[in-house]
Image (cartoon, rainbow, N blue to C red):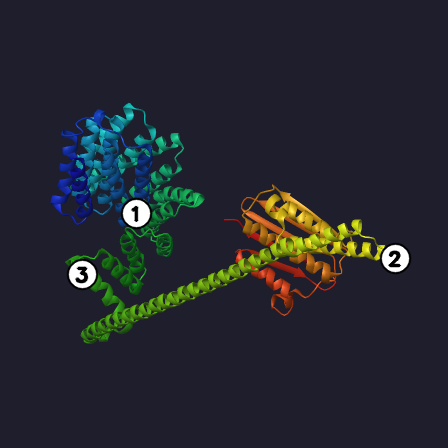
Amino acid sequence: MKYGISILLLFSLLTVRESDAQNADSLGLAIDKMLNGEFATAKISREISQKDSISVLHYLAEASRYQSINPDSSLFHITKALDLVLAGRSLGLVSRSTQALGAYFLSREMYREAMLCYLNSLKIEETREDEVRIADLNDDLGLVYYYMEVFDKSLAYHQKALDIYKSRHDTPAIARVLSHLGSLHSSRHFCETRNEEERLSDFRTAINYFEQSINQYSITGDGRGIANGNQNIASVYNQMDQPETALAYIRKSIDFYRQISDPEGMSGALYTLGKTYYRLKDYDKSIKSFKESEKIGLDHNLTGGIQYLYEALAMPYYASGDFKNAYEYYIKYMTIRDSVYNSEKSRQIIELETKYQSEVKENKILRLTAEKRRRNNILYLLTGVIILLGLSINYYIRLLRKKKIIADQNIEIREKKIAELEKERLYLAARSVMEGEEAERSRLASDLHDGLGGLLSGIKINLSSMKENAVITHENVNAFNHALSLLDTSISELRRIAHNMMPETLNHYGLQTALEDFCTEVSPGGQPALGLQFFGDEIRYTKEVELTMYRIVQELVNNALKHSEATQINVQVFSEPKRLFAQVTDNGKGFDAAAVEKGRKGKGIENIRDRVTAMNGKFDIWSKPGQGSEITVEMIIP
């Protein structure tokens, strides 16, 4: 049942903006089902989650913010809010969302739909017995009847709201309703036929309500409420044909809005100031005020009701004899109103146009009117064709650009894919070469150590036995001992070569120990000074990673020993769980790093680069002639 109600209500929301009476009524039917069926009382309604409640309040706040600048966005946020509250079954939030929808309809002058929304919200709040919400909705209904020019109904609803607020000592709400009552009485002559004495009485009553409202706003320190009250009083004094008195009030309002930089308030206050100056017959200041109001409205997208500003602008232009501008602004007003000219409006336009044309060539106006109309029609037609042609060309150009962008993107994707495949190919090739090289090193080391090494050891044992058992002349003893010493040196050198080709220390004890042994072996006399610093935990990486880093450091140190002529070589290794970093520096003669980067020097460097590429790492060289060198290698451990 819940989801059926949700679908029905959402369908109503999406279609009611077209003023379809059946869809507007269906909103009330859906709420009636909620109240009489599954959600008969507020006590049994299951509130939605706190997160969704916050989202609903956010949507309603956004709807209120967009109400005067983008009604479609306002309706979108209201629909989102109702979607959430219906899914969560919260009567209080359904009421607030429906009230927001009523405010949207009221801003679009869809009074019947607005009234239905407010009445449905009121029905929910009467069930929930929420006095404050009941007062709020009565005040809203009073506004609907105010715009519909039904004085008695509007007064009754506003008065009911005021009584509730007074009983609760709600000062801000009291101030708001008093302001509404002032506006109602100042407009009573639009609702009913009133003679001059009655009109003046209504105006005095309106001013009294506005002053009471200002007093209440003063208690709460609401500057905007005070400024709005002063503006309303100025409007009433203008209607009473007392613009001098009105001027003092509207200046207070403008001073406040300028102080707080409120464009919406400024735009409205300047509109009232323009009407005041018009009544004072100061047409230049009137036009200046209206134009400033127009500029602020356009700059800040406050265009609701701007047609009335254009209508007002036409009046001081007309009164000052500037019939051209008066005509143009009245045309703007009529165009925006988008309504059929009635006889009175047509008469005013014809009069303005006639006076404008009379300033140019009064004696030719009758003869040229028909020709001008025909030319204008042709011009409009040609303009329309040009616009359509321009739009078509623009669309076609944008389509071509879009296709070109897509084609360029496809080419770029293919190039990236090719580059990635080439990179992967180089990576696999380097890995294969490195694995083959290490396998061959391992095999040679094993052959040297186990084959040739064993053979030399056997020869040494046999010779030692012969020395003990054979009779050797004194002259041959030194030669025999020298041969055994050379044999020991050969065995040691053979073992060193085998160790360098495949260090057993690396397999058994890890990278740190292997590098320490290597540094000790290659610089036993301390010339040049070879230092090793190992930072971080002694982590055991994969055999492949440790062996690659060992070979790279080995190659870099050997290069420095052979070519740098350095007195100090430093090796630093940083070991982290996800990163292995090595740096080899020396204070030697240095070299041209740019030449190395271009591949014109150093086969060893090329081998190192291949090893780094095979491990998908980073390799960087810094060196200058006479300034030593610094080479870094980084491997990211997956």
* Residue lying at 39% horizontally and 29% vertically, measured from the top left: 219
- Name which residue type carries label 3: Ser
Q: Is residue 19 visible?
A: yes
Which mark, by number, is residue 346? 3
Q: Residues within 10 Å of mark 2 (few under 14, many from 20)?
A: few
- Asked if residue 182 lies left or right of residue 36, the reply is right
Q: Which residue is mark 1?
A: 68
Residue 114 figure quarter: top left
- Asked if residue 171 lies left or right of residue 336, the reply is right
* Residue lying at 55% horizontally and 46% vertically, measured from the top left: 541
- Name which residue type carries label 1: Ser
- Mark nearest the camera among 1 and 3 is 1
Q: Earlier in the sequence, mark 3 or mark 2?
A: 3
In depth, the one of 379 and 309 nearer the eye is 379
In depth, the one of 87 and 612 nearer the eye is 612
Tag 2–tag 1 contact (CB < 8 Å): no
Alpha carbon distance from label 3 to label 2:
144 Å
Q: Which residue is mark 2?
A: 475
Q: Residues within 10 Å of mark 1 (few under 14, many from 20)?
A: some
**At which x and y percent is residue 537?**
60, 41
- Mark nearest the camera among 2 and 1 is 2
- Name which residue type carries label 2: Glu
Alpha carbon distance from label 1 to label 3:
30 Å
